[in-house]
Amino acid sequence: MKKMLLIVIALLHLHPGITQSSDIRYTDHTYLPNIKSIKFFLGEVYISYPIIRLGSGQQLTLIFDDLSVNAKYYTYRIIHCDKDWNPSNLTELEYLEGFSGERIDDYQFSFKTQTPFVNYQLRLPNQDITWTKSGNYLLVVYDADNGRIPAFTRRFVVVDDQLRIQPDMVRPAAVSKNRTHQEIDFVVNHEYLDIRNPRSEISASVLQNGRWDNAMHSLSPFIIKGNNLVFDYNDKIVFPAGKEFRYLDMRSLRFGSENIASIQRYEDGYEVLLYKDNKRAERPTVFRNDLNGNYVIETTDQRDFDLTSDYANVLFSLYSPTVYDDYDLYVVGGFNGWQLADENKLIYNNSFNGYVAKILLKQGYYDYAYAMVPRLEKDKRPNTEEIEGNWFETNNDYTILIYYRPFGGRYDQVIGALTFQSVN
């Protein structure tokens, strides 16, 4: 009987359709409203990106809250993807040692908070599971207490370093973008890797501030010089520079920071009113060290950040005599994965003479921006240009990922990754 059970389990994991659920999105997405404050990063570096070296001994750290008084049965699955974030042709037995579907059993209950929650943590790889191949991966967390429904998904990348990447920030070739955009050129040296047909076997993706929603994909080498692959295009690998992010310092709910107008405590939680923001597209940029859109959970009121940082309803407001009839406005940033969700959507309020949104946030330090999205167009990516503006000297993070699929290969390897800042 035991032998038969093992055979059944093996067959389930060999069948590609079993490992790839049709009811999930292959993006960073949160499905359940009770899931908050998802952080996914490398090791102990809280504002790093989930990019890990194959066989490095490092771990990715996942932390999230469930706004509940009781612990739930959460499980996770890891899905290998191609360079375009579609499920790859590999089965779990080909890219994993161990099995997906294990329970996330590291959890603790909040204490000294007005809003109760359960804090969950997971390290990957661990004694139950590890990956054996490089590539794009999707982590899916399920709520197994309610019929194994998806709770959230997060992308991560496993890199098998086999080459060197040399980036170069240049002024955009298009004169109209010279003071508002940033252009990236780079050279890939594959001295120790024999690549027969670089233009068909090598491609690159470039991310700004860890964002996948506006990343550039499927970039091929423009020039081949021996072992050097040159990605030097005119007006192609170009990003709007944006401006240094707005910020919210909510590490204390006892003492307000400079952009908090008031803090009210009630029996069931806190309410934080921010000073009204103004549009700044036409204003000079202000240089300061920001988190490049990221956020940190932290409190100065207590000691244990994960368990004693409380939640508050934060009221954002943007002064705007103009109503944008053809656009929806959102508060966006790393704290919501740049998702265009109803909970971070702004509504016009005549009494405020502008747009307002009430968002539930955990104590911490947050970068954020205001974005517009056209209602009738298919392109639903958040655009911050109209409200925030662009300035070419803004400091941004850029990440270059190099994908390799040799002739006859069944999956896209990631053989190089580099993150650098546009301003050194």
Image: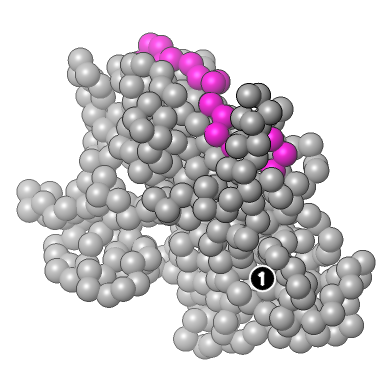
Q: Residue at x 53, y 88 (%)?
A: 174
Q: Is residue 13 above or below residue 280?
A: above
Q: Residue at x 72, y 60 (%)?
A: 414
Predominant SS along the magenta part: loop
Q: Is residue 375 above or below residue 236?
A: above
Per the rendered image, the range of residues in magenta is 96-113
The colour scheme used to paint the residues is one colour
- Report the amino acid beneath label 1: Ala
Residue 136 on image: x %, y %: 62, 56
Q: Is residue 232 above or below residue 285?
A: below
Is residue 262 shown left or right of residue 323? right
Asked which secondary structure carries label 1, the reply is strand
Q: Does residue 35 show up?
A: no
Is residue 185 rendered magenta in the image? no
Q: Residue at x 71, y 85 (%)?
A: 222
Residue 392 on image: x %, y %: 53, 71
Is residue 109 rendered magenta in the image? yes
Is residue 258 shown left or right of residue 50? left
Q: Residue at x 80, y 42 (%)?
A: 56
